[in-house]
Amino acid sequence: SLAGCSSKLGLHPIWQGPIRIPGGTRQSPIDIRVRDSVFDPHLQPLSITYDPSTCLQIWNNGYAFLVEFDDSTDKSVIRGGPLKNQFKLKQFHFHWGAIDDWGSEHTVDSKVFPAELHLVHWNCCKYASFEEAIMEDNGLAVIAVFLKIGKHHQELQKLIDALPLVKHKDTLTEFKNFDPSCLLPYCPDYWTYFGSLTTPPLSESVTWIIKKRPIQVSPNQLAGFRNLLFTSVGEEEKNMVDNFRPLQPLMNRTVHSNFK
Ligand SMILES: NS(=O)(=O)c1ccc(C(=O)NCc2ccc(F)cc2)cc1
Ligand SMILES: [Zn+2]
């Protein structure tokens, strides 16, 4: 099949992107081996301030659905933790599987979660735009939150109810007054390491902050993600599932934690 042959060329069936980037030394995602992570007492608490008035729209870009924010103000920002500067929220999106047993990009001691949320921020102290920051080694900070199957997530349902409006690639819908703080676990514990984007251009510009505790969503809510399509209007329909990249080698990196 097409997918089969592209994997022989070292291309990932979904993205036709490289499974391994030539010369890549800090690629993502990785398996977080908890016993190899190093507690760093100097890691500050992460300061997260999100303003729901900056929430703009939802866009299906053919890889995932993105909830996009107005980054012309500094109302939705993070700082502290492993970060030396302030970073502005640009968008958040998820990665998920065709079934509940698989879907996350990162794993913890080889444990896979059904889905993973990425809150994408860019270094507004050092760069003028997201597009510029994405190419710089300390340009981006992505907070990753694992999703597990459990109780219904009240606020997430507002987002899921809007997904039928962005079913096809390159469709978008207005989406206002959503506070992404509701998608964060209360527990402040996280791991952090230097990595990359997990979709093309795979830029090695990301400080990853991986929350230790997952959030819970119901089986039906996760099923709502799977009704989205990779394909545009008029194309043969392909359900948007398994939009996660394979694990990448840790190489010469240490994962740090802010907890013992
Ligand atoms: N899964 S992840 O969190 O690692 C991730 C986050 C953002 C992007 C992205 O913005 N790509 C589009 C893009 C690429 C280059 C640009 F210059 C602008 C936008 C890709 C992957
Ligand atoms: Zn992502």
Image (cartoon, rainbow, N blue to C red):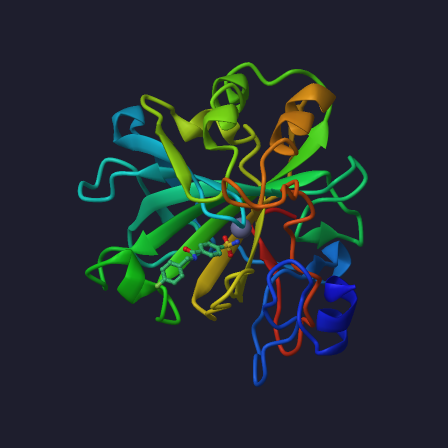
Above-or-below relation of 154 to 201: above
Rendered-image quarter of ligand 1: bottom left
- Tell me: residue 84, above or below residue 164: below
Task: Name the side, left or right, on which 257 lies relative to 178.
Answer: right
Judging depth in this view, the residue of 235 and 187 nearest the camera is 235
Q: Is residue 218 visible?
A: no
Q: Residue at x 34, y 43 (%)?
A: 89
Q: Is residue 246 left or right of residue 80?
A: right
In this view, the residue in front, 207 or 178, is 178
Residue 42 x, y percent position in the rendering: 47, 56
Q: Residue furthest front?
A: 234
Q: Is residue 141 left or right of residue 194?
A: left
Describe residue 130's horizontal placement relative to residue 110 as left or right: left
Q: Position of residue 198 (x, y in %)?
A: 56, 60
| Extreme-bottom residue of the structure | 23
Residue in view at x 51 percent, y 18 percent: 161
Return the residue nearer the eye: 219 or 80. 219
Coordinates of residue 192 in the picture (x, y in percent): 55, 56
Name the image quarter holding the N terminus. Answer: bottom right
The image shows residue 98, relative to residue 248, as above or below, that is above
Vertical relation: 115 (above or below) 126 = above
Q: Residue at x 69, y 17 (%)?
A: 151
Q: Quadrant of residue 26?
A: bottom right
